[in-house]
Image (cartoon, rainbow, N blue to C red):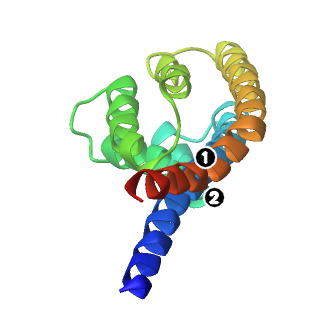
Amino acid sequence: MIWIKTLGIVFIIAGFGSYGLMGARRIEKRVEQIKNIRMALGFLEKEITYLQTPLYLALKKTALLTAQPVKILFGESSRLLQDRQGITVGEAWEKALQKLKPACDLNQDDLEILKAVANQMGSSGIKEQIKLFQLIQEELQIQEENARDQMESGRKLWSYGGFILGTMVVLLLL
């Protein structure tokens, strides 16, 4: 009988602890994903402004060089533009963002920055495109720094908090 209680205690603490560790991992992944987006946008900028690659091809090349889940944003945008369904670049980008949203760990502020790119990408001259990409890069850099700061404190909070909460639940049940 006591071994069943002990096993239950272990499962409760392990369950809450693993939930806390998953939360800590989500915080770390956000930093990683913002960095991947920044790098991908840098590559996309070079493709559009210097090589003057058509936008759907530039997005496709960017998707090939980008890790999941960020790859979804560029790959889906490229696919939608390549299908020639009569949608604009902004609409394709926003649809791709909607597809990216459940697969990533980005917060609403990160997604809003990316959404701001939608209507301006590919619709102006090279100098304006360079300015747009520089502005987005700077904003994403700030978001990445904020995410790193949150990661330092949040990782410990989630990691320890999960195990502590599991222990408290066990104590309340005893």
What secondary structure is marked by label 1?
helix
Amino acid beneath label 1: Gly
Residue shown at 73%/32% (left/top)? 144
Q: Quadrant of residue 1?
A: bottom left
Q: Name the residue at the left extreme.
A: 85
In the image, 27 versus 112, the foreground residue is 27
Residue shown at 47%/78% (left/top)? 6
Count of numbered circles in the view: 2
In the image, 80 versus 171, the foreground residue is 171
Q: Looking at the rendered structure, which numbered label has been put on residue 60?
A: none
Mark 2 lies on residue: 65
Residue shown at 31%/43% (left/top)? 80
* Closer to viewer: mark 2 or mark 1: 1
In the image, 54 versus 134, the foreground residue is 134
What secondary structure is marked by label 2?
loop
Give the x, y percent position of residue 58: 56, 45
Q: Looking at the rendered structure, which numbered label has been put on residue 161?
A: 1
Q: Is residue 17 above or below residue 58?
A: below
Amino acid beneath label 2: Leu
Residue 1 falls left or right of residue 106: left
Q: Is residue 106 above or below residue 164?
A: above
